[in-house]
Image (cartoon, rainbow, N blue to C red):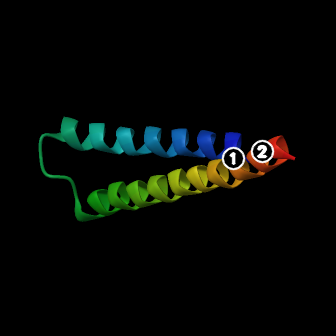
Amino acid sequence: MQKKLVALRGRLVEEQQKLIMQAASSGVLPTDSAVRKISDIENAIMAVEHMIEELGTTKAPAKSAAGKA
């Protein structure tokens, strides 16, 4: 699952960067909807990163406990 989450994070980052580059290239302020979409993607990236972190921390104690047994 962690690999899938990492791949999803990569796709989200690519999409966000694409939108930011389009906004920068236009030479004018981005539309409200573009700013909102960039922000929404940022929130999704943070959520995915949190899940990746949670998966990493939930697996670590299990491995440690198994190693101690």
Residue 7 vs residue 26, the one in the foreground? 7
Specify the amino acid type for callout 2.
Lys
Can you name the residue that lies furthest to the left here? 28
Question: How packed is label 2: few (under 14 Cα within 10 Å), some, or many (20 or more)?
Answer: few
- Residue type highlighted by circle 1: Ala
Helix, strand or loop under label 2: helix
**Measured along the vertical axis of the image, is residue 47 above or below residue 21?**
below
Looking at the rendered structure, the secondary structure element under dot 1 is helix
The image position of residue 65, as x and y in percent, is 79, 50
Residue at point 59%, 45% (across, down): 8
Residue furthest to the front: 68
Asked if residue 12 lies left or right of residue 69, the reply is: left
Residue 40 shown left or right of residue 69 in the figure: left
Q: Which mark is residue 14?
A: none
State the separation of the CA atoms marked 2 and 1.
5 Å
Residue at 28% in and 37% down: 21
Label 2 with label 1: CB-CB less than 8 Å: yes
- Residue 19 coordinates in the image, percent (x, y): 34, 44
- State the mark number for residue 63: 2
Q: Nearer the viewer, residue 27 or 8?
A: 8
Question: Where is residue 27 shown, x and y percent of the image?
Answer: 12, 40
Picture residue at 49% right of the left edge, 46% below the top: 12
Residue 54: image location, x then y, percent: 61, 56
